Amino acid sequence: MAWETIHKSDRPGWPAANLDDYASVRQGFSWEGARSLLDGLPDGGLNIAYEAVDRHLEAGLADKVAIRWLGRDSQRDSQGNSQRDRQRDREPVSHSDSHNDSQRDSRQGSLVNSQGDVQKAKKANPTPATCCRDLSYGELARLTSRFAHMLERLDVAPGERVFSLLGRVPDLYVAALGTLKAGRVFSPLFSAFGPEPVRARMTLGDARVLVTTAAYYERKVAPWRQELSGLRHVLLTDRGGEDLPEGTLSLADALATCPDHGGLAATRAEDMALLHFTSGTTGKPKGAIHIHGAVLFHALTGRYALDLHPEDVYWCTADPGWVTGTSYGIIAPLAIGATLIVDEADLDPARWFGILQDQRVTVWYTAPTAIRMLMKVANRTDKGIVGHYDLSRLRFLASVGEPLNPEGVIWGQEVLGLPFHDNWWQTETGGIMIANYRSMDIRPGSMGKPLPGVEAAIVRRVRSFAAVPAEGPAGDTFWALLSPGLAGAGEVSAATAAVCATTAEELGLSPVPVVTSEAHSPSHVTAQARVEQAFPATSQPIATIEVIETPDTLGELALRPGWPAMFRGYLNEPERYAQCFADGWYLTGDLAQRDADGYYWFVGRADDVIKSAGHLIGPFEVESVLMEHEAVAEAAAIGVPEPTAGEVVKALVALKPSFTADEALRKALLAHARKRLGPAVAPREIDFRANLPKTRSGKIMRRLLRARELGLPEGDLSTLESDER
Amino acid sequence: MSTAMTKDQILAATLEELTNVAPDLADETIPPDADLREVFDLDSMDFLNWFTALHRRLGVDIPELDYPKLRSMDDVATYLAARLGGL
């Protein structure tokens, strides 16, 4: 192996590791035992907000800081920007003074002040932006009670969806926990989404309430709002009085008269709590349903996979618009009773090292894209600015979002003094499934081993003609990959087979010996029965699964359903949900292998979803927006490698006959896509083609396009009906 | 080429490269002091591509550590002018 195993040792003063010996903790684990991590409601129910906030008051933590919020304008002096910012804040703008007054008034009444989260608001408000705010557990309990009562007063029914479209401001955290407290369902959206991803998700999620800012509302929601009649209330965090756009309410005004205690709904563990959207290869985004019972898993994995202790100052850099930012950027640390750092600003190396130092962060959870950005400013021989900071408080570093390359793991060790612990999970799993633990040696590049209570396997799908997965090429890929002899049959793309065979060859894989699931019949039967019991309507098997026992063999990563944070459905799409399961396994769509010592290694995605900066992007969502343009006849979106983000979106477009492929049109298409999708989802590059390669059934062969972009062998093209020109 | 550039020329080059990276801004009025991330949703990849293009065009290296200071058109043009020599 190219990278040496990292052996670690504890430093003096560190608390004992929560998971001190992987094998014995895993061996002795039971969900019944884990349940003692929670208090539960008196009537036997379970509520995430109660576990994360209110119960700590009874334990004497009312005055402890739950969330320390750092506003965008904090920590700016070191960069010499504060002078200019002060000038800008005083700058007169088109808003009249009376608007300023009404804003100030509304802010005085605001219980959840939104300090300068939008430029317009900041400019209009001459009050200097507050740079930092502490929310104690007690204050968080009061604020979330007000929010919960407000939803009741607004006639939002239990189970209905409350969406947010906000930056990382205190209002977001209060809205999330207040909604959960009230037994309504919270769905956070990434604030950099353009109008189209916002519209698609709010429509699929049947949004009843939206909490946002005036600027986001006007740009991303107002243009299409009339299409969504179910959206009854839009609550703005930064406007009040007479300054409100039509059809909106002031959040501060709505909260003002609500009581600051109570409001806790008697939710059950199986009640829907959160709706997180994710993307597949085909179709619209999918709303993954998570339940209140998931909080047990968040509390557990926060302890085991992140080594979180109640005394920790913990910083999760993920935005709650993505699942990590909710599961581990809100719920897990608060359920454990730690102090959570929230930074409103985006990545800025000097600022980040400053936060780690000044806030005395002990546990840090971040992402490969961020780590790779930081790697540009410091290395082993030249620590650069890192040398100016005291990072000695750090105890545990973790990373998620995409596989962290070994260089990143080692960089942590050499430059920060601690290695990064990579872990793996998905929106659907709700929490960390496979992780590197504080007490376990790290094999750089590996995602680690399954959490106690989680059963993982490397499997292959065996062809079942009766039920071909409708979700697209995933199934084809597996058959092609693992059974090259079958690759010519049916819709299986030869190019796919070629790409995958190449991958397998590069990995030095031998033909795949398998142990069929019969060999595991006892647990198999139990798990299958469990799935059928839990999901009677959606448990039709789609394929037979064979578990691969031979080490270092490529297959699909699969998980046994049964951990509490597992998604309970895609909202209103039982078929797509059913397609995720076979033979008692949840099929992740990720290709991986396991070594002889049980460490898992990520290999790639089995489908065509694009992973950019750790975020899944569905090609269909991108292609649909390009197809709206009058010049576009067909479009394919693929991921192409990029050193920092991992992949970026590239679109290949064929034009209608009357249009000319020139620079002006290329820019017009980029502009269109960016306006509709936002830069996080829109293509960074567009190339023109006269025709895109398609199969007999007319399916565009994204994998062939990608193989060509990457200079990989195209393989046998016999199933190709219409080639690229 | 750097010695002959006026601030207006620098500003024009800066804007041109910005709208190459983010063509959606081509038909927008961009206030020179507007925080591009806040007001126009530019993300870190956009900034990286923009600064890389400016480096290519003007020969001015922009180290990563300076990125966070460069939030508006004014910031970038002023920074480039200083690097290009005493304007």
Image (spheres, coloured by chain):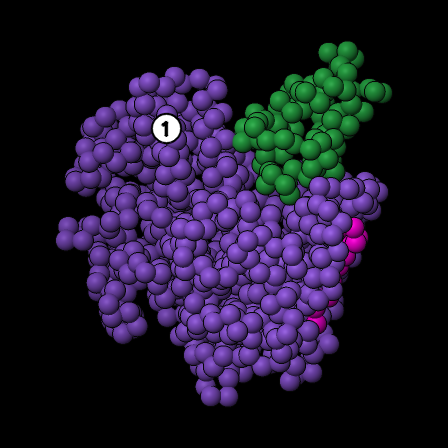
Chain colours: A purple, B green
Residue to which mark 1 is pinned: A630
Residue A391, position in %: x, y? 75, 55
User: Looking at the picture, does residue A534 appear above or below residue B78?
Assistant: below
**Is residue A172 in view?**
no
Residue A37, position in %: x, y? 54, 79
A172 horizontally vs A561: left or right: right
In-front residue for pair A207/B78: A207
The residue positioned 40% from the left and 18% from the top of the image is A661
Residue A384, position in %: x, y? 76, 40
User: Looking at the picture, does residue A399 appear above or below residue A260?
Assistant: above
The residue positioned 73% from the left and 61% from the top of the image is A105
In-front residue for pair A201/B3: A201
The residue positioned 62% from the left and 22% from the top of the image is B16
User: Looking at the picture, does residue A314 appear above or below residue A722?
Assistant: below
Q: How many labels were placed on the picture?
A: 1
A573 horizontally vs A664: left or right: left
Q: Is residue A83 magenta?
A: no
Residue type (three-letter) at the residue carrying disc 1:
Glu
**Is residue A156 in view?**
yes
Q: Quadrant of residue A529?
A: bottom left
A221 horizontally vs A527: left or right: right
A637 horizontally vs B27: left or right: left
Chain designation of label 1: A
In-front residue for pair A320/A435: A320
**Which residues fall within the magenta stretch?**
A125-136
